[in-house]
Amino acid sequence: MQQARWCGKPAAATQVEWQMGREWLKQYGLDTPEQFIEQISDVFGKLTAQIGGVFRLTAKKPDPANNHQSQVATHPIWLKIVEVGKRTIGEASSTLSRLDRSTLNENGAIRQIMGLGASIADRRQEFCESREDLLRIITACLISNEVTDEQIEGAFVKKANASGTMPALLSFQDKEAA
């Protein structure tokens, strides 16, 4: 540490790390290392934002009963860490926001399903030339891998909650709409 990094023994040192998996990054349209590097200051801004950030140290313990925990003051040491990070990485040039998945075209997802189904059929050495064949092969694969309806429902509920569509799926139609 003294030789390679600090050119001498520092009075104090702080290390802050985040682990961001590919799925988290893809939510924000960052799919390649080049995209991440290009927007690293925006990612840092998202991680350290006072409101809506991923993590921050507070000056005092938040009261769990308080519905306005975002109003708890940020610890001065955390503010200093963020300041040093911004000087090192740069100020965010834009607010990192999640992709709007509601506008995505299903065509790409269907093509992926077709490609995966064709790969499974090929590996299983089963002929696949129709929707019925594809559904039969995927169903057989789900059964042979012991995928249950509960697991499928769980995956769907997780995705619907993450995307924000679950409340609409569970709401009742107005009498006029019904």
Image (cartoon, rainbow, N blue to C red):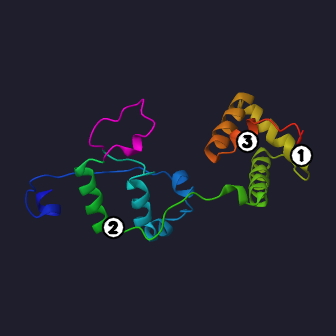
In the picture of the structure, the residue carrying the numbered disc 1 is 133
- How crowded is the residue under tag 2: few (<14 C-alpha within 10 Å), some, or many (20+)? some
Above or below 91: residue 101: above
The local secondary structure at tag 3 comes to: helix
From the viewer's perspective, tell me whether residue 163 is left or right of residue 12: right
CA separation in Å, label 3 and label 1: 33 Å
Q: Earlier in the sequence, mark 2 or mark 1?
A: 2
In the picture of the structure, the residue carrying the numbered disc 3 is 168
Closer to the camera: disc 3 or disc 2? 3
Above or below 145: residue 138: below
Residue 102, quarter of picture: bottom right
Q: Position of residue 8 (x, y in %)?
A: 7, 61
- How crowded is the residue under tag 3: few (<14 C-alpha within 10 Å), some, or many (20+)? few
Residue at 27 percent across and 38 percent down: it is 60
Q: Position of residue 52 (x, y in %)?
A: 46, 51
Q: Can residue 54 be seen in the rendering of this structure? A: yes
What is the magenta segment's predominant secondary structure?
Answer: loop
| Residue range (magenta) | 58-73
Residue at 54 percent across and 59 percent down: it is 97
Residue at 61 percent across and 59 percent down: it is 99
Residue 143, quarter of picture: top right
From the viewer's perspective, tell me whether residue 145 is left or right of residue 77: right
From the viewer's perspective, tell me whether residue 159 is left or right of residue 16: right
In the picture of the structure, the residue carrying the numbered disc 2 is 89
